[in-house]
Amino acid sequence: MERRSRRILLLFIVPAMLLYLTFWILPVLMSFFYGLTDWKGLGSYEFIGLKNFKNLIRQGTLVNSLKNTVVYALVVVLWGNLQALILSLILNMKLHARGVFRTLVYLPALFSTIVAAFLWSYVYAPYYGLISEVLKLLGSTWVPNLLGTSATALIAVAFVETWRSSGTMTIIYLAGLQNIPDDVIEAAKIDGCTSWQSTRLIKVPMISNTIMINVMLGLINGFKSFDYVFALTGGGPGTSSNTLMYSIYKMAFMESQFGKAEAMAACAFVFILVISISVLSILKKKEIEL
Amino acid sequence: MASMQMAITLKEKQRRALIKEIAITAVIAVFFLVFLSPVIIALSGSFRGVRDTSSYLYLFQNVSLESYKAAWGKMYYFRSLKNSVIVTFSAVILLLLASSLAGYAIARLRGKLGNFLQVFFLAGMIVSAQMSIIPMYRIVNALHMSNSFAAPISMYVTASIPFSIFLYTNFIKSGVPYALEEAARIDGAGMLRIFFQIVMPLTKPALVSIVITQGVPIWNDFFFSMLFLSAPEQKTLPLIMLNFIGDMENATQWNMLFAACFLSSIPVIAVYSFLQRYFVAGLATGSVKG
């Protein structure tokens, strides 16, 4: 009986496993394989060993994309979490307009990435865009082109990501805050805690689990950044906003360098794996200390 | 005397609390005004005539539905909406079935195998679709699925499987008592019946969470449909939005672009306004218990 039910349980896993192996694991293994070839998408290909990897390093593509991805992820994780944490602390207060604010905060999350990108490409547009118009209104003659300037393009793109994901992060933080028992906060108040103290010393440590989830979500979204780069800058100006995923896409689809693209993908895979595992273990350790 | 004084201080306290609340509410209201300014401006812009190029800072002047009409036609609205509905609903239903069956089985498998499978599926979170597009493309072609909805649907299900299984397994482990299933089995119920009649109804919060956290991104995604659907009449709403990308260069097309943004967002906004509490609950379950 026990053995039979175990066999049925294993059967339950089969549909998900088939999909997962066919469309997720097999492609990853295949891409590692193509990374060692000079395949151009058509015709035959040859094994060229680690040449793709050497080229990626020598041409600086790998380092540049890695650097951009890290900057992007840092903006998403740091600014995204700070913004969401502050918003959730405020929206957790007993305000009459709380319900309205909670509805509003989630609004950007309802737009698709492509719509969010369109809205923000208007905000950033030089001359007639929102930022330019407001500056003009304030009497400034400065016409910033945030997406068209190498120094700011990447940050401007990452900011759109934090704008759209802030609602989700805030709601997750709110759920964490509501899980704190009221009597803990009450007891702190009676013991003379100011509200800043109870926020810093009680609320934030007590939602460390939620912080971990949001940090991981931000990291994963940051490392996978593609949509906004695709729609807003196309990796430019130059290669200043080329992230890992966008570089891979560009190499594969616009330059037909499939082998090289998949070598890049293999690097990205290892990189994300290492970062995810180390961040998880650091956060786990922190949690135990708290 | 003393009680009167207490009454005064109580009133004074209430007055201070009220002032504090008004101040905080005002600050947040201003924040949301800035935070949502791209949405407000775009909404006002969408209600302008197609050729109205006056400054966007003049909100809701000369209201016209001309831009909506133009966008409606360019988007083939009902066709795209229908395609989005077909793709999203099929993907979400298949996802719910595959991930709940597997998630349940993993939770109930004793020994190392269950733990291994949970980690094995979870590891898929670090894979991003862009990393292995070419192999995915080849596999889809080999299975004769290209240019049919089956391709993006299978990819959406697969891409959502890692998180969904993780969430479902954790939910079962932490909240569904094994004793119920044991009792049903003694009464002679088969495994499938136990799952669908006893386990599934108990896991509604987890299922809602999967629908919200995975369904909304599937609805909003353009990448897999861009990759696998080339026929114009198969385009989904987010994919058809890419037709407007060239219009970003053209300052005179913005009103129509804004109208298209809202037309493509209306379905999600409508669903959200009716089912807001499910959105909040779904995000909370996904994070706090996940």
Image: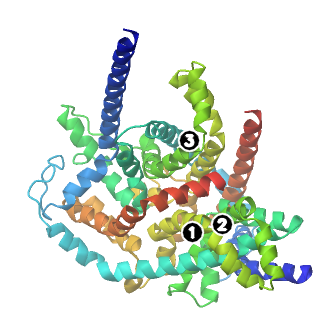
| Residue named by callout 3 | A177
Residue type at mark 1: give it.
Ala
Residue type at mark 3: give it.
Leu
Which mark, by number, is residue A262? Answer: 2
Name the chain letter of the residue that bears numbered label 1.
Answer: A
Which mark, by number, is residue A252? Answer: 1
Residue type at mark 2: give it.
Glu
User: Horizontal placement of A3 versus A217: left or right?
Assistant: right
Q: Position of residue A134 (x, y in %)?
A: 23, 39
Q: Are marks 2 and 3 on the same chain?
A: yes
| In contact (CB < 8 Å): disc 2 and disc 3 | no
Residue A28 figure quarter = bottom right
- Label 3 sits on a secondary structure element that is helix
- Of circles 3 and 1, the one toward us is 3
Q: Position of residue B249 (x, y in %)?
A: 28, 59
Q: Residues within 10 Å of mark 1 (few under 14, many from 20)?
A: many
